[in-house]
Amino acid sequence: MKNAGRVIFFIIAILCLGSGLLYAYLEEIDTQSQVIKGEVVGVELLKSEITIKFKQKNGDNDEIILAINEATKVRKDTVEISFTEIFKDDKVTVEYYVDSKSFGPPIAREINVVSIPQ
């Protein structure tokens, strides 16, 4: 009888460990970043959102709306700037991720506004 209790305890412990590892793996998948290069077509300061027009790998034009949060880093070349300093028609490179726990748009992790040589 004592051995049966130990076996059941051992099985429960393995299941808990396995589910914890699976959760950690899925969490990592959810926050994997993607990078796009494109042009700003809209900035919604009140919503903290930005719309980027970019080309897909197959050459088709596409747009994506990205959320901006307090962790989003915004730069112009190497200098940090404010989200309010991004304007329509700016060329940008954006790193973003999808948060599966949120029903909102993907979240911009980093936005780099590219200076156009004069």
Image (cartoon, rainbow, N blue to C red):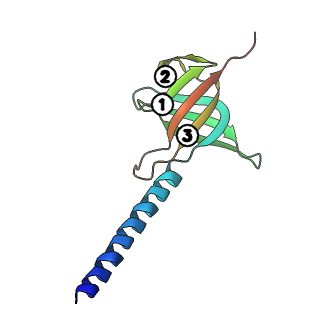
Q: Secondary structure at mark 3?
A: strand
Hey, which residue is sitting farthest top in the picture? Answer: 118
Quadrant assignment, res 19: bottom left
**Dot 1 crowding, Cα within 10 Å, few <14, some 14–19, many 20+:** some
Residue 79, position in %: x, y?
A: 58, 15
Indicate the amino acid at tag 1.
Answer: Thr
Q: Which dot, 3 or 2, sits closer to the camera? A: 3
Residue 7, position in %: x, y?
A: 32, 82
Along the viewing direction, whichever of 4 and 21 lies nearer the viewer: 4
Q: CA distance from mark 1 to mark 3?
A: 9 Å
- Horizontally, is 50 left or right of 58 in the view? left
Residue 1, position in %: x, y?
A: 22, 90
Q: Provide the residue designation for mark 2.
A: 83
Q: Residue at x 39, y 66 (%)?
A: 17
**Dot 2 crowding, Cα within 10 Å, few <14, some 14–19, many 20+:** some
> Going from the N terminus, do you reach mark 1 or mark 3 first?
1
Hey, which residue is sitting farthest left in the picture? Answer: 1
Q: Which dot, 2 or 1, sits closer to the camera? A: 1
Indicate the amino acid at tag 2.
Answer: Phe
Q: Are marks 3 and 2 in contact (CB under 8 Å)?
A: no
> Going from the N terminus, do you reach mark 2 or mark 1 first?
1
Indicate the amino acid at tag 3.
Answer: Tyr
Q: Residue at x 41, y 50 (%)?
A: 103
Q: CA distance from mark 2 to mark 1?
A: 9 Å
Q: CA distance from mark 3 to mark 2?
A: 15 Å
- Horizontally, is 52 left or right of 7 in the view? right
Q: Provide the residue designation for mark 1.
A: 72
Q: Are marks 2 and 1 in contact (CB under 8 Å)?
A: yes
Q: Provide the residue designation for mark 3.
A: 96
Image: 4 above or below 46: below
